[in-house]
Image: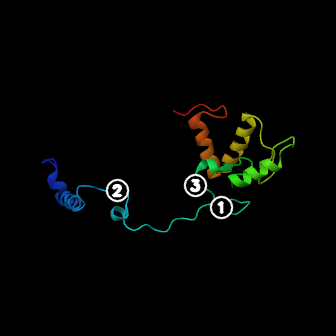
Amino acid sequence: KCQNKHRKLHKLECKRIKTELDRRGGKLDLGTEKDIGPLGEVPPREECPICMHVLPIHQMLHAFSGCCGKTICGGCNLQHQTKSVGRTQDTCAFCREPIPRTDKECLARLIKRVKLKDPKALHSMAMHFLHGRLGLPMDQ
C-alpha cells in the first residue's frame, strides 16, 4: 500500500506492480526472464593456457600464478606438482619460475604484476588485504 502523500507521483507504477503481483499470485520472482527480459549471450569463459580446457567456475579448482599472471586449471597444476616431486625447488606450471617460499617474495611478485595493471593480480591483492594475508594489514 502506498502512502497517500506521494501516491500521486507514482500512481500508474503502483497499479502496474499491483496488477503484476495479482497475476502471479502475490509472488514476485526477481531475476527471472519475466522480470529482466531475455538474457543475452553468455560471455565465453577463460581457458587454461596449458590444456586449453575451460576453467572451472569454482575458485578452488584453479590456481593463479603471481609470476606470470596466468590462471591454470587444477588438473594441470596437480599434474605439474606430481611430476616435480623430488626436485629441490617447486616451479610455476606455466613459466617454470621458482615458487616463492616466503610471504615477502610472494608479495614482491604480486606487486610487480599489480604495477603492470594485471586485473587478476589487482583482485588477488585486494583479497590479500581483505583477509590480512602475506603480512598485509586487514582491510576493515
As drawn, the label of residue 30 is: 2
Give the residue type at disc 2. Answer: Leu
Residue 74 rendering spot, x and y as whole percentages: 68, 52
How dense is the environment of label 3, judged by Cα within 10 Å: few (below 14), some, or many (20 and up)? few
**Mark 2 Cα shell of 10 Å, populated few (<14), some (14-19), many (≥20):** few
Q: Amino acid at mark 3?
A: Ile
Which residue occupies 66% across, 31% down?
135
Residue 116 in sight from this viewpoint: yes
Q: Quadrant of residue 29?
A: bottom left
Q: Is residue 70 visible?
A: no
Q: CA distance from mark 2 to mark 1?
A: 31 Å
Which residue is tagged 1?
47
Q: Horizontal placement of 33 versus 16: left or right?
A: right
Q: Which residue is mark 3?
A: 57
Snapshot quadrant of residue 39? bottom left
Q: Which sits earlier in the primary sequence, circle 3 or circle 2?
A: 2
Q: Are marks 2 and 1 in contact (CB under 8 Å)?
A: no
**What secondary structure is found at the residue carrying circle 2?**
loop
Residue 6, x across and y down, in percent: 16, 50
Q: CA distance from mark 3 to mark 2?
A: 23 Å
